[in-house]
Image (cartoon, rainbow, N blue to C red):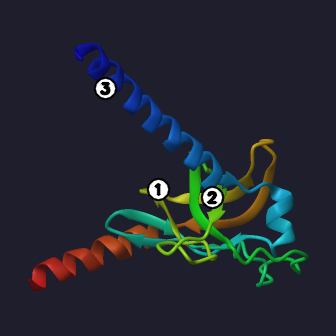
Amino acid sequence: MKRNLRITLIVLPLLAAGIYIFYDAIMHKTADWDFIQKVGGIKTQTPLETQDGFYLPVICNVSGTDSITVKPTLIYSALSCTKIKVDITENKIYLTVLIGISNSNNINCNCKAVNIGHLKHGSYKVYYRDKSSSEHQIGQFDLSETVFFNYAFSIKIRSSNA
């Protein structure tokens, strides 16, 4: 009896981990550059500064119903943008879109803004990177010292009114 219990306690967590890995592999697939182009492209806008750092708006509709930078050639109405991976190296920001089957909790095919953290002032270029490690520039922006000063000043004013 104890032996069966030990086997069960070992097998069940391994089985659960296997199911999770299988589910994650099916539900979250990296969108390669060719796919992004077929569904209408991708671009970024000017980052928004918050207390949590900067958020970079990402404009991409993985369903293929919107023309972002190119005219879409395929439609995938069941797909959603499940996550965007971010990698920052010096003044280069690399984005990778993960796609998956839409479910009741995530029915939006539009990508959301991503947190890029607290950045130093300077010029930044944004690239799309897929599994082939190809770099495709999709945006750029400048963070000047004025932006940081205005944000710090506005926080100081708000805190003095409290």
Measured from the top left, where is residue 66 in percent x and y? 76, 84
- Look at discs 2 and 3 and give the one toward the viewer: 3
In the rendered image, the vertical position of residue 149 relative to residue 6, given as above or below: below
Q: Residue furthest left?
A: 162
Lower sequence index among marks 1 and 2 = 1
Disc 1 residue crowd, few under 14, some 14–19, many 20+, Cα 10 Å: some
Question: Can you tell which quarter of the image residue 58 is in?
Answer: bottom right
Q: Is residue 158 above or below residue 62?
A: below
User: Could you tell me which residue is drawn at 11 percent across and 80 percent down?
Assistant: 160
Q: Is residue 26 visible?
A: yes
Q: Amino acid at mark 2?
A: Tyr
Number of other residues with Cα within 10 Å of mark 2, as a class: few under 14, some 14 to 19, many 20 or more: some
Circle 1: residue type = Leu
> Which disc number belongs to residue 119?
1
| Residue in view at x 63 percent, y 70 percent | 80
Callout 3: 10 Å neighbours few (<14), some, many (20+)? few
Residue nearer the viewer, 103 or 136: 103
Horizontal side of 1 relative to 27 (left or right) equals: left
Image quadrant occupied by the N terminus: top left
Report the amino acid beneath label 3.
Answer: Leu
- Viewer-nearest of discs 3 and 1: 3
* C-beta proximity under 8 Å, tags 1 and 2: yes
Depth check, front residue: 42 or 141 = 42
Question: Extreme front residue here?
Answer: 1
Give coordinates of residue 62: x percent, y percent: 71, 72
Nearer to me, 135 or 142: 135
Residue picked out by circle 2: 124
Answer with mark 3 or mark 1, whichever residue precedes in sequence. Answer: 3
Q: Would you name the residue on which mark 3 appears?
A: 9
> Residue 50 location in percent, x, y?
37, 71
